[in-house]
């Protein structure tokens, strides 16, 4: 959710939320699983972007990506 990203980025950069604009592309396929777990990654990427005044790209390897964003809520299923 862009609001969570905005909140975390504003907090990390010590800025008011009104000074942070988040543009989020469609993620797809996560059924909500990816919408909030990536907010702290955005916050981490915002620091060099803010200091350098340039876009930055933060790339995670697949293992780290799955540890951070690949979690699911537990569930109980029954079948016959």
Image (spheres, rainbow, N blue to C red):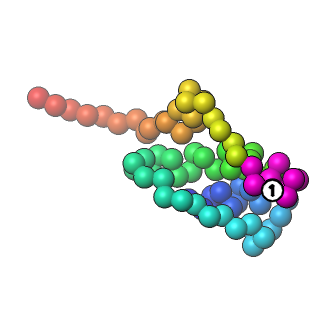
Looking at the picture, tell me which residue is in the foreground, 36 or 45: 45
Q: Which residue ends up furthest to the bottom in the rendered image?
A: 18
Which residue is located at x 44 percent, y 38 percent?
72
Residue 11: in sight, yes or no?
no
As drawn, the residue found furthest toward the right would be: 51
Which image quarter is the C terminus in?
top left
For the point 81% across and 50% down, the residue is 47
- Classify residue 55 as left or right of residue 72: right
- Of residues 15 and 49, the one drawn nearer to the viewer in this rendering: 49
Q: Is residue 13 left or right of residue 64?
A: right
Residue at x 81% of width, y 56% of height = 54
Magenta-span inclusion, residue 1: no
In x, y percent, where is residue 75? 35, 36
Q: Is residue 58 left or right of residue 32?
A: right
Bounds of the magenta span? 48-56
Question: In the displayed structure, does residue 56 sit left or right of residue 60?
Answer: right
Residue 16, how many percent across, how many down? 80, 68
The residue depicted at 64 percent of the width and 50 percent of the height is: 39
Residue 67 x %, y %:
56, 31
Graded by Cα atoms within 10 Å as few (under 14), some (14 to 19) or many (20 or more), the crowding at tag 1 reads few
**Residue 48 shows in this picture:** yes
Label 1 sits on residue:
54
């Amino acid at each position: 959710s862009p609001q969570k990203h905005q909140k975390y980025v504003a907090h990390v950069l010590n800025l008011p939320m009104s000074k942070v604009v988040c543009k989020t592309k469609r993620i797809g396929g996560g059924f909500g699983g990816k919408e909030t777990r990536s907010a702290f990654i955005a916050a981490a990427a915002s620091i060099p972007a803010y200091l350098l005044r340039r876009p930055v790209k933060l790339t995670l390897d697949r293992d780290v990506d799955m540890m951070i964003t690949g979690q699911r809520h537990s569930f109980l299923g029954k079948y016959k």
